[in-house]
Amino acid sequence: MTTTIRFLTLLMLVFIIGSQSLVAQKKKYFYGSWNFDAPTAPPGYEIGVITITSDSVFTKYPNYINILKSSFVSFQNDTLTFIFNPAVEVTIKLTVKNKKLLTGEATWMSDESVITLTKIQPDKSKKQKGK
């Protein structure tokens, strides 16, 4: 009986640690810079670059000088939710499709837009010049 309880406890610990590692690994899929396209967003907000770190999200639009920092970030399994407030609060919820593609929706006031993010690949020629 005691051996069975010890075995089940050990098995449960292995499962918990393994699942936490998997969640952390999926979270890393989000990190980096992404080009985004939100075709039905208001004019000037349809395209840009989103940079995702472990605790913040930064959004840059081509026609604006300021970079917007998120006020809330949440990673849940394969979904990232963040909020920023340029003039109106915008909530963006993204899901991992693969390591180079995120999809989801942006919602604000009483409207929303589908949003697609494509990973920006680092320029390998710059890395080679630094060697």
Image (cartoon, helix red, strand yellow):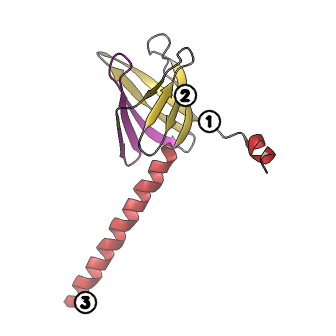
Q: Distance between the Cα atoms at labels 3 and 1?
A: 52 Å
Amino acid bearing label 2: Val
Which is nearer the N-term, disc 3 or disc 2? 3
Q: Distance between the Cα atoms at labels 2 and 1?
A: 9 Å
Q: Which residue is mark 2?
A: 49
Looking at the image, which is closer to me, 111 or 24? 24
Q: Which residue is mark 1?
A: 120
Q: Secondary structure at mark 3?
A: helix
Give residue 86's position: percent from left, percent from top: 39, 19
Q: To which quarter of the image does residue 90 belong? A: top left
Viewer-nearest of discs 3 and 1 = 1
Residue 97, magenta (yes or no): yes
Give, as a single range, the part of the protein colored magenta: 73-98
At horizontal 39% and vertical 25% (from top left) the residue drawn is 106
Q: To which quarter of the image does residue 24 belong? A: bottom left
Q: Which residue is mark 3?
A: 3
